[in-house]
Amino acid sequence: MGFFYALFTTFVLMYFLYDLLILFAGFVLKITALFNKKIKLFIDGRKLTFFKLQQAISKEDEVIWMHCASLGEFEQGRPIIEKLKLKFPTKKVVLTFFSPSGYEVRKNYEFADVVCYLPLDSAQSAKRFLDIVHPQLAIFVKYEFWPNLLKELKIRNIETLLISGIFRENQLFFKFYGGWMRKSLSSFSHFFVQDENSKQLLNSINLNNVTVSGDTRFDRVFEITQQNNKLPFIEEFIADKYTLVAGSTWKEDEMMLVDYIDNKASENEKFIIAPHNINPKDIAELKNSISKKVILFSEKPFNAAQDGKNLSDYQVFIIDTVGILTKIYSYANIAYVGGGFTKTGVHNVLEPATFGIPILIGPNYHKFNEAVDLVKNKACFVVDNSKELSLHLDKFFQSNELRLKTGEKAKKYVVDKTGATAKILEYIAK
C-alpha cells in the first residue's frame, strides 16, 4: 500500500512541477517575443485560440480533433482528415498546430472548420480546450505528447489515436526513470506506428494496442501524382529542356548549385531553385550570386508581349513563394533536396520520389527513414561537396536510361509503402 501511495504522490508532484515549468516557459516566451518574429507569431497566435474555438464550435457539434506539431506532421495527418471529412461531412474538424511554420502555411486549410494554435499545455488550458472542443476523436501525429492534455483525454474517456508514430530507444519513455512520461502513453486508445522497431519498443513497456501501419505520408505523396499538377509558367520556362529542381535549399546547398550553374552547366540545362527561406534579402543575394540569366517568381511576366519578358529566355528560375514546390517537382528530370548540410537535416525526399525522379541530398539524412531507404535502394545519392554534386549531375544528364531506371526505383519505393491511411480508417470505422 505504501508503494502505491508513494507512486501516486510522485505522479502528483510531477504534474505540479510540469505545470510550473509550462507557466515559466510561457513567461519566457512572452519576453523573447519582443525580439524574435517567429516567437511573436507563436505567442500572438495563441491569444486567439479560445476565441476562434468558441466562435466555431457549439455544444451540439460532433468534433474530430487533429493535432500536428508543424507542416511535416500536417502532411502526415492530411490524408486522414480529408478521408474523414468526406466520410463524415457533418462532423466538424479542429486542426491545431504547435509551430508557426505549420499554422501560417495552413491556417486557411479547406478541410478543417477551425485551424488554430494549440494552447500551452497547462492543466487549466487543457481542461478549457477540451471543454470547448469536446472531441469524439482526438488524433495526434507522429510524436506529439502533451501530458496534461493526454491526462484529460483519458479522464474524459475520449478515443485518442497516435498516427504515423515513430519511437526510438533513446526516448524518455524507455528509460528506467521515464515512468511519468510512460503514464502519458497510457492515454492512447491505439498506436499506429511506422515500423516494427516502434512496435517492439511499445511492447517492451507493456503497451500492446499497437499496429504497424506505415507512414501516411506515402499515401499523401502518391495522391499528389493523381491530381492536376500543371503549371503553365513552368512549362514556358523549361521549354522542353533538361531541368534540375532544387527544393527547400539552404545557403550551403545553394553555394554548390551556383558553382555548378556558373562553371559547369551547359546551355541545355535549366534550373529551378525553391529556397527554404524566402526572405527578400536572401533571395536577392542568391540571385546576384548567379552569373547566368535569372528570374524570380515574383518577377515573372503576366503578359509576355506587354512586359517584354519570355520565361524561356532564362536559365535559372528562383521560386520566392511557397505552396507550389510539389507541383514543380513533377517537371523535374532530377531533384536536389536541401537541408542535408544543416543540423535539422534533409527536407522531404518523398515529394520528388513519388514522381519517379533521381534525388540528390546532403550528408545529414540518417534520422529520416525514407531518406535512408532511398539511399540504400540507390534511388537517392549523397553529395558532400561541389565536386560530388557535379559528378552525379553529369552522370544523369548524359544517360537518359540511368535516369529513368533510378527514378523508377524511387517511385516503386513510394508505391510499395502506401496503405497506412486505409488501415487507420478501418480502425476508426469499427
Image: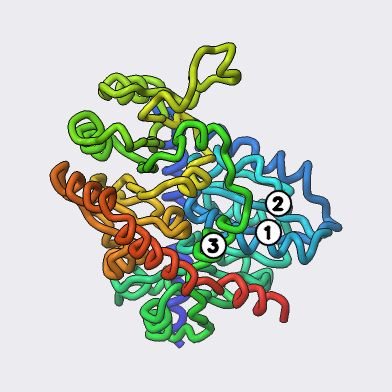
Determine contact: label 2, label 1, CB under 8 Å. yes
Q: Residue pushed farthest right?
A: 60
Marks 1 and 3 sit apart, C-alpha to C-alpha, by 14 Å
Marks 3 and 2, Cα distance to the nearest angstrom?
Answer: 19 Å
Residue under label 1, please give it: 82
Q: Is residue 297 left or right of residue 151?
A: left
Look at discs 1 and 3 and give the one toward the viewer: 3
Residue at 78% x, 45% y: name it: 56
Across and down, in percent, residue 233 comes to: 54, 32
Q: CA distance from mark 2 to mark 1?
A: 6 Å
Amino acid type at circle 1 is Glu
| Residue 184 in sight from this viewpoint | no
Residue found at x 30% / y 32%: 267
The correct choice, above or below, for 292 with respect to 352 in the image is above
Residue type beneath disc 2: Phe
**In the picture, residue 319 is in which quadrant?**
top left
Q: From the viewer's perspective, is 284 left or right of 137?
A: left
Q: Amino acid at mark 3?
A: Phe
Q: Earlier in the sequence, mark 1 or mark 3?
A: 1
Work out whether mark 2 precedes mark 1 in sequence or the reverse, and give the earlier one: 1
Question: Neighbour class for label 1 at 10 Å: few (<14), some, many (≥20)?
Answer: some
Q: Nearer the viewer, residue 386 or 6?
A: 386
Instruction: Write down the residue under mark 3.
Output: 222
Q: Is residue 23 above or below residue 222?
A: above
Q: Please tell me which of labels 3 and 2 falls first in the chain.
A: 2
Q: Is residue 248 visible?
A: yes
- Percent from the top left, x then y, of residue 232? 57, 35
Q: Secondary structure at mark 1?
A: helix
Q: Residues within 10 Å of mark 3 (few under 14, many from 20)?
A: many
- Residue at x 53%, y 52% (from the top left corner): 121
The residue to which callout 2 is attached is 111
Q: Are marks 1 and 3 in contact (CB under 8 Å)?
A: no
